Amino acid sequence: MKTLYISKLTAFFVFLLLLQAGCTPESSSGTEAQNENPTEEGAEETVANSPAKRAAVNKPASGDTKTFVLTDTDISFELPASFKVSDRSRIKQDIPAMQEDPLLLAPLQGGIDDLRSEDDFPDLFVDTGSRYRFFLVHNFEHLDLDQQVQGAIEKYLDKRMDFLAKLMKEIEIQRKGIQFFELDDQNRFQVRYLFTDKSKPEHFIWLTMYFIATESQSYYILVASDTDDDMEAYVNTLKEG
């Protein structure tokens, strides 16, 4: 079960690499974040021998969010007010990058298909105020997210990224941060990557993945954006019931 689920994520990375070529930010915010505030090699956050303890977490400012409920559940998140519910049939209309290059649509839909569980698709939320930013949530049965499991995920992702880097030599893949920590009601493993077109550095995607385990559920959250926006405060709004 663990290996099967993690292996499904590989296809998602592949389609995101295909999408990457179409993501050129219209504003300079993403490029500035990449060029002016790079994470130096070796300076990324690393997973400690013991998970970090967090007594409190940052939450988004009140009044700037909307509540979104996952399909057929009572699980909710707060996301920026510019976000809206989308799905595989509407992403062409909802994500501007899809309209500019229709060839990007099939890989994105295929990636969503690969993460489906029986008849349930992951929940997809897109930012209507951005050219390319989405927040994907897939909830599934409880999986213990202990140090052994997070170590296996980290090792698997490292191998897959090395493989993809060799397969697609025109793409530079950098891991920009990794953390494993415990909250009062959950364990969390999160990792962040920057994908850059070597020949066109203005083409890039920031990817942040969150693996979360509560007492009753597990979650895989993927945030993809053409700007260096931190969405952790919104991930922290996860509410069950």
Image: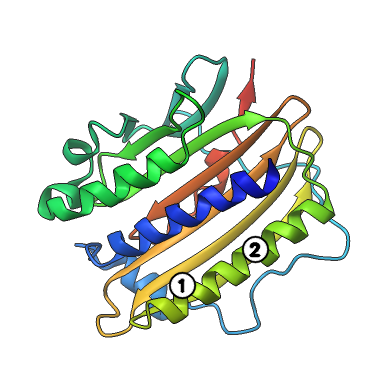
Packing grade of label 2 (10 A; few <14, some 14-19, many >=20) is: some
Looking at the picture, does residue 205 appear above or below residue 107?
below
Looking at the picture, does residue 128 appear above or below residue 12?
above
Looking at the picture, does residue 129 appear above or below residue 103?
above
The residue located at (68%, 69%) in the rendering is: 45
Q: Secondary structure at mark 1?
A: helix
Q: Give x and y (percent) for residue 219.
A: 61, 36
Q: Looking at the rendered structure, which numbered label has been put on residue 164?
A: 1
- Residue 44 found in image quarter: bottom right
Relative horizontal placement of residue 153, taking residue 205 as reference (left or right): right
Relative horizontal placement of residue 107, taking residue 14 as reference (left or right): left
Q: Give x and y (percent) for residue 152.
A: 74, 59
Nearer the observer, 200 or 165: 165
Task: Point out the tag, 1 or 2, that comes first from the N-terminus.
Answer: 2
Which residue type does callout 2 highlight? Tyr
Relative horizontal placement of residue 189, taking residue 114 as reference (left or right): right
Q: Give x and y (percent) for residue 234.
A: 53, 39
The residue located at (45%, 34%) in the rendering is: 79
Q: Which residue is mark 2?
A: 156
Which residue type does callout 1 highlight? Leu
Nearer the observer, 136 or 143: 143
